[in-house]
Image: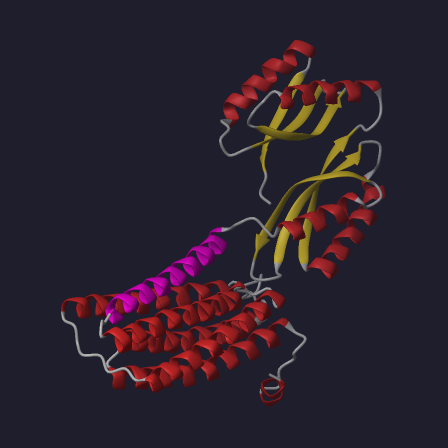
């Protein structure tokens, strides 16, 4: 690996350098393995071995696309794409998954054809040794690629590693099939080829599902969310933080918003320097561009405690209400404000009506302003 880093002038401590170097290693190894398997498979008329060779050739393309996607994702933001090009990595994963699925379906078709029109298989112990050696190499390469994918926090690179490791398992089945043929003269080559091809399709579908999930928008990593909440809630002057939303614009590139609860007696002038420094700190530590909204709350006083206890009792008895926040009584307008966090099975209109009816029993002369929230992270 040191040689690859040196030849291609890559930084082994950077995310881009790790992904690029690992992808180049995969390309070199898979080209050699694909050529050896395809040649051995054609000479022995083994669809299982040829299928593995074709899958290894697809791995070359997967690694090449990962390399290209990583390079393009590093392009700087511009007027057309102010949030940068990080999501190109997800599009790369989408293309890779489609190619894997297509290759697997082609091999399934060929395996089924051979089931009904079997051809003579010419397998030698030499060809088995070639397959066994490549299986060991693929397993080691797969483990290494997965570990580098986790280190660089690259799902695409990790997926390439998992697929690489799965290839080695397929090779074990191919070897078993060949040994059965050599020892018992019974050919199950087409069936093994079918099973291996189905594994290829499944790997492609898994990558496709994961990539589509990211493009559609899935919750951010729980560790990141917890660290951000901890950073905000432990800031002097902030009572609580809620309603966090994070938008993923590629690995390690987020924009987001969060509402903070502030003492209603504090002025904007007092809180601005605190929130501004917190915003800068979050960007430097987590690469998240965070925007703050705020709720005014009264953390002291009997009326505030009584109001919170009343609302807490309601939430405890409601199946679909997960939590509450932003509780505030404005004496000037005679309004009570509260946000309720619902699960995805709740009917917001029913909850709002039920909550207002409940609150009117205790505060008949107050106007109840309730807002419905959802947990986005």
Residue 271's x, y, as percent?
A: 82, 43
Q: Is residue 210 magenta?
A: yes
Q: Is residue 198 in sight in this rendering?
A: yes
In the rendered view of the protein, which quadrant contains the N terminus? Answer: bottom right
The image shows residue 215, relative to residue 120, as above or below, that is above
Residue 24's x, y, as percent?
A: 51, 81
- Viewed as shown, does residue 237 lie left or right of 96? right
- Viewed as shown, does residue 115 lie left or right of 77? left
Residue at x 47%, y 84% (from the top left corner): 28
Q: Which residues are magenta?
A: 188-216
Colour option used: secondary structure
Q: Is residue 364 in sight in this rendering?
A: no
Q: Main secondary structure of the magenta part?
A: helix
Residue at x 60%, y 88% (from the top left corner): 3
Q: Looking at the picture, tell me which residue is in the foreground, 333 or 111.
A: 111
In the rendered view of the protein, which quadrant contains the C terminus? Answer: top right
Residue 238's x, y, as percent?
A: 80, 40
- Viewed as shown, does residue 178 lie left or right of 328? left
The image shows residue 50, relative to residue 103, as above or below, that is below
Q: Looking at the picture, tell me which residue is in the foreground, 68 or 313.
A: 313
Residue 35, image quadrant: bottom left
- Viewed as shown, does residue 269 lie left or right of 30? right
Residue 99's x, y, as percent?
A: 36, 68
The image shows residue 159, relative to residue 56, as above or below, that is above
Residue 91, image quadrant: bottom left
Residue at x 32%, y 82% (from the top left corner): 38
The image shows residue 5, relative to residue 261, as above or below, that is below
């Amino acid at each position: 690996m040191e040689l690859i880093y040196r030849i291609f002038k890559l930084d082994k401590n950077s995310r881009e350098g790790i992904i690029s170097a690992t992808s180049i290693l995969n390309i070199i190894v898979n080209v050699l393995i694909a050529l050896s398997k395809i040649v051995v498979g054609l000479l022995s008329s083994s669809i299982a071995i040829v299928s593995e060779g074709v899958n290894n050739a697809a791995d070359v393309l997967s690694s090449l696309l990962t390399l290209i996607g990583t390079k393009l994702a590093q392009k700087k933001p511009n007027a057309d794409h102010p949030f940068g090009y990080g999501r190109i990595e997800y599009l790369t994963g989408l293309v890779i998954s489609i190619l894997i699925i297509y290759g697997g379906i082609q091999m399934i078709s060929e395996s089924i054809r051979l089931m009904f029109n079997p051809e003579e298989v010419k397998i030698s112990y030499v060809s088995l040794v070639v397959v066994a050696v490549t299986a060991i190499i693929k397993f080691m390469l797969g483990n290494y690629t997965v570990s580098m994918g986790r280190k660089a926090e690259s799902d695409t690179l990790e997926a390439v590693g998992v697929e690489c490791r799965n290839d080695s398992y397929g090779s074990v089945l191919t070897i078993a099939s060949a040994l059965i043929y050599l020892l018992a003269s019974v050919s199950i080559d087409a069936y093994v080829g079918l099973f291996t091809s189905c594994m290829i399709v499944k790997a492609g579908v898994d990558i496709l599902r994961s990539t589509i999930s990211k493009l559609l928008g899935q919750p951010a990593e729980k560790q990141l969310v917890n660290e951000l909440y901890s950073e905000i809630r432990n800031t002097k002057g902030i009572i609580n933080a809620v309603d966090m939303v994070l938008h993923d614009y590629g690995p390690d590139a987020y924009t987001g918003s969060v509402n903070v609860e502030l003492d209603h007696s504090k002025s904007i002038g007092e809180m601005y320097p605190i929130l501004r420094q917190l915003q800068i700190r979050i960007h430097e530590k987590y690469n998240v561009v965070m925007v703050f909204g705020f709720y005014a709350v009264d953390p002291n006083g009997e009326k505030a405690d009584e109001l919170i206890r009343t609302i807490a009792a309601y939430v405890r008895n409601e199946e679909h209400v997960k939590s509450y926040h932003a509780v505030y009584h404005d004496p000037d307008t005679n309004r009570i404000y509260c946000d309720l966090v619902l699960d995805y099975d709740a009917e917001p209109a029913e909850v709002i009506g039920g909550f207002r009816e409940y609150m009117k029993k205790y505060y008949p002369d107050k106007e109840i302003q309730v807002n419905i929230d959802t947990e986005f992270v």
